[in-house]
Image: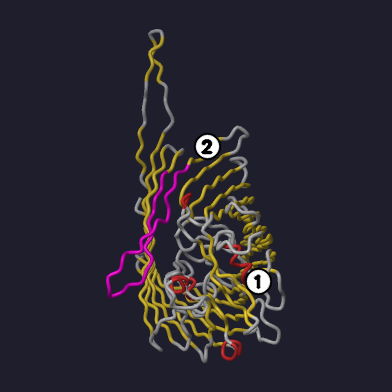
Amino acid sequence: MRKFIIIVFPSLLLAQEAEEIYREEQPTRVQVSAEVFGASVLIGTPINDLSGRSAAATGDLLNILRARSGVSVTFANKFTLAIAGIYVGEAASEFRRLPIGLSEAYVQLDTFVLPIGGLGELRIGRQIINYGMGLAFGDYHGLGTNAIRFNYRFSPAWDWYLHILYAKSNEGGARQVELFYYPFAYYDQTTNQQAFKWIYTKYDIETWALIFGKHRGDRGIYDFFIYGAAMTEDRGLSGGFNPYWVGGYINIGPIGNFYMEGELGYMTGQWGSRQEVCYDFCDQIYNITGGETQQLNAYAIGIEASYDFTDQITGGLSFFTFSGDNPNTTGMYESWISPLPRSGISTYSAWTHWTGMGEVFIWNYRPDNWRSIYFFNPTNFVVANLNFIYKAFPIQQSLIIRVDGFMFAEAASPSGIDSYLGSEFDLALKFSYADIADIGITFGYFLPGARFQNTGWSRPSRLDLFLEGFVPDYQYLKVSGASYVVRLWIYRSINFF
């Protein structure tokens, strides 16, 4: 990283003697970074699509491109300006407006000393917010969130910290020009199935959070944090959408050759209103459930562990579950909603060449592709995973082979209905080409269970197509046989200076 340094040597003459007063070095640091991810994805049916439009029965090939670039300037270790843009889309033959979005744009006051002796950092603007495994606070692949975040470190000699976070979940601003949508899960008595309805608010949705934790430090073996969060809806009416969250995260290792991380979140609160029809977020829910108040009671759990058997072989396992609205109970909303609705789960790379939860079953977790079994934020979902990693060269890891086995189920299902959804086998190869880029190929093969083949599974339709009137709120998905996905990808990250 280059530094542009200006050093000023003022002099002052006092009583015939010249005394030099030296000022400390005040560097200006400029950093420019870029990253790009490109992939060609071949989809083998009979996985149905949720697009609502006709599609080829077999052999769909999608070409995906994602690119992000940004620059940050830090003045005298006291003040930082940063901006970054992101492109997300499919490569298509027809001309399309480039979907370039603002990933980051913030002003930051760096490490100013507070009167009580700690160090503070204040960041205001659009920023990427990531904590833990992403169950509660996880950026959706570089899109960023409009937020204010204050980071406080109690002492330069301590690894303990406190973060105060305010985020704007719907980003229409004070003019409230943007509608903010959620797929609301409920029980459809006519079909004896969980169903979904897209609901929205045109009012301000805001998230507040406190995160208290400890960094690993130079010689520590663990990181952890605990958090409390609340979401408020400013609508000028009594009641509203008021969920609350508590949870925590821990990362342990290495203890010998053992590593582990886990996260737990619990959501409570209520949707409340005194007006039956206002056409806002809360009251649409009441029209569905037939009551004036919905109590909230949901959880999310994630755990991953691995062990290095040798310098070349690693074995691991993982388990994730997100509670679903149990169709055997009434009067309570039990599906997990994250404090930041753009949450995603991937701890392996910025734009993950491996989803971490199944290449076929939830490969649309990356927001590029329109065909998916699983869609939107995690809800009513359980996955168990066993994996093995082989590093061909223990010193220079130019070739890595990963094998995964998955089992999927619903967290809540109707009485008498099998909750088992299916299993999957994944094989991924990653090769570093001449220090220029990472190249890989991933193969996933999904075997549906009886639930998919006989009863089907309801999933929310794609929002943009629902708003255009092409599809209903949700669709039942049945899979008649095995399906596969093959993905060839290239990834490169560059820091220019």
Left or right, 34 with reference to 358: left
Q: Crowding near pointer 1: few (<14 within 10 Å), some, many (20+)?
A: some
Where residue 66 appears, x then y in whole percent? Answer: 38, 66
Earlier residue among tags 2 and 1: 2
Q: Nearer the viewer, residue 8 or 471?
A: 471
CA gap between label 2 and label 1 equals: 51 Å
Q: Is residue 105 magenta?
A: yes
Residue in view at x 66 percent, y 59 percent: 274
| View extreme (top): residue | 15
Q: Nearer the viewer, residue 151 or 173?
A: 173
Q: Residue at label 1?
A: 289
- The location of residue 238, given as percent across then percent down, is 65, 54
- Which residue is found at the position 61% from the left and 41% from the top? 157
Provide the residue designation for mark 2.
Answer: 112
Magenta segment boundaries in residue numbering: 81-108
Q: Identify the amino acid type marked 1.
A: Thr
